[in-house]
Every structure is written in structure tokens, then in C-alpha cells.
Image (spheres, helix red, strand yellow):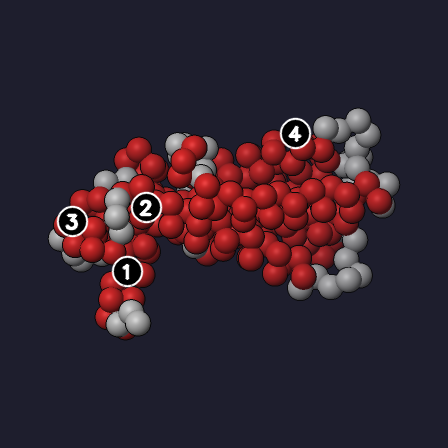
Amino acid sequence: MTQPETTGTRERILAAAATVLSRKGYAGARLSDIAELAELRTPAVYYYFDSREHLISEVMTVGQRSVLEYVTRALDELGAGAGAAVRLDRAVEAHLEVELSQSDFATAVTRNVGQLPEELQEGFRADGHRYFAVWDGLLAELDAEGLLAPGLDRRAARMLVLGALNWTAEWWDPAHGDFLDLVETARRMARGALTASHPLHPSLI
């Protein structure tokens, strides 16, 4: 059985790695920076993780799962009566919430998922597909309510919307913009891209 102190140190390393990845990206994430933030010597990291790649892969797995769980929970909390457009608005908001302010793990995923070598993506690919399925479901709901813009390539539409949301971690700075304004703009863009220009629901403005 893992001792509590060992578990705590391992979690501290993971948290430090998530912070470094979210700030510096995959290419710039050095074990020495991660160890310093975790208040350890660099060689100590290898007691808990076989390699830099093993550590990064685990951070990405935790991060992808946190995005999936956070957005799914936000949609579930809307209840069965929420319309498809309201659910789309909430999914956009929840994605930005978890990406930008709730979790360094989530930020690490959204910032680095496109930078990782193929072999490092295996560990979190299943959760990634489950998250894609959430968004595919949102598009299907829009279609069922007659709101989905005709002629869309749904896979391309989903990836373009998620790509735009993920890219926010690269450029958004809370010192230069209000988060609620960002959310409203993102909602309007998603609505404009996916639907026949229906206005935002008043309760979500």
C-alpha cells in the first residue's frame, strides 16, 4: 500500500507539472522547473515517474478527465427541460470555466493536446473521444429541435468550435478582458457557427 506521504508527494509533482505545462507548454516544460515548483530535487521526480513523458501523459489524462467531468456535470445540472440552444451555451461557458479558471490540469490539456507526440496521446484518448461524444450529442439535439444550420459537416463543426475554445488558453489574459465578456462572445460565435442565428437565452446573458 502506498504511504500517505508518498501519495502526497506524487500529487504535488502532478500539480506542479500541470502548472508548468499550462504556462510553458509541452516543449518548454522542464523537469527541473517542475521539481522546483514541487519543492524537490530533480532526480526525486524519477522515484515517482519513470520519465518526463510518463509524468506529462498522466497530467494530460487527469486534465482530459477533469474537462469531461466538469462540462458533463454542468449540462446535467441544467435539468431535462433545458433546450438545445441553452445547453450549447452552457457547454461553451463550462469549457471556458474549467479551462481558464478551475484547473491547471484542464489548461494543460487544452493548451498542449495538439503538441504531444502520438505515443503520449494513448493514455487520454478514450476520455477525449467521450468528450467529443458530448459535443456530438449537443449538435444532435440542435438538429432534433430544428436549430442546426443545414449542410454542416458535424465532425468539422465540432472540431472547429472546440479548437477555438481550446486556443483561448494561449491568448486570453484576465488583466486585459472580463471573463463574462469572453463567455458571451464565445457563445455568440458558437451559436452563429452552428445554428440559424438564434439569440442568447436571457437567463444565460
Q: Quadrant of residue 28?
A: top left
Spatial CA span between label 3 and label 2? 15 Å
Q: Quadrant of residue 181?
A: top right
Q: Furthest-front residue in view?
A: 1
Q: Nearer the viewer, mark 4 or mark 1?
A: 1
- The residue under the point 40% across, 35% down is 119
Spatial CA span between label 1 and label 2? 13 Å
Question: How many numbered circles does the render carry?
Answer: 4
Question: Which amino acid lies under the numbered mark 3 shown in the image of this protein?
Answer: Thr
Q: Earlier in the sequence, mark 3 or mark 2?
A: 3
Spatial CA span between label 3 and label 4? 42 Å
Q: Nearer the viewer, mark 1 or mark 2?
A: 2
Above or below, comparing residue 114 to residue 91 in the picture: above
Spatial CA span between label 4 and label 1? 38 Å
In which quadrant will I find the N terminus? bottom left
Q: Residue 42 bears which disc, if any?
A: 3
Q: Earlier in the sequence, mark 1 or mark 3?
A: 1
Residue 201, horizontal then vertical, whole percent: 75, 51
Q: Earlier in the sequence, mark 4 or mark 1?
A: 1
Spatial CA span between label 2 and label 4? 31 Å
Q: Residue 54 bears which disc, if any?
A: 2
Q: Is residue 184 at all visible to an observer of this figure?
A: no
In the rendered image, which residue does mark 1 sit on?
Answer: 10
Q: Nearer the viewer, mark 3 or mark 2?
A: 2
Residue 42, horizontal then vertical, whole percent: 15, 49
Q: Earlier in the sequence, mark 3 or mark 4?
A: 3
Q: Quick check: marks 1 and 2 in contact, CB under 8 Å?
A: no
Question: Which amino acid lies under the numbered mark 2 shown in the image of this protein?
Answer: His
Judged from the image, the secondary structure of the residue bearing numbered disc 2 is helix
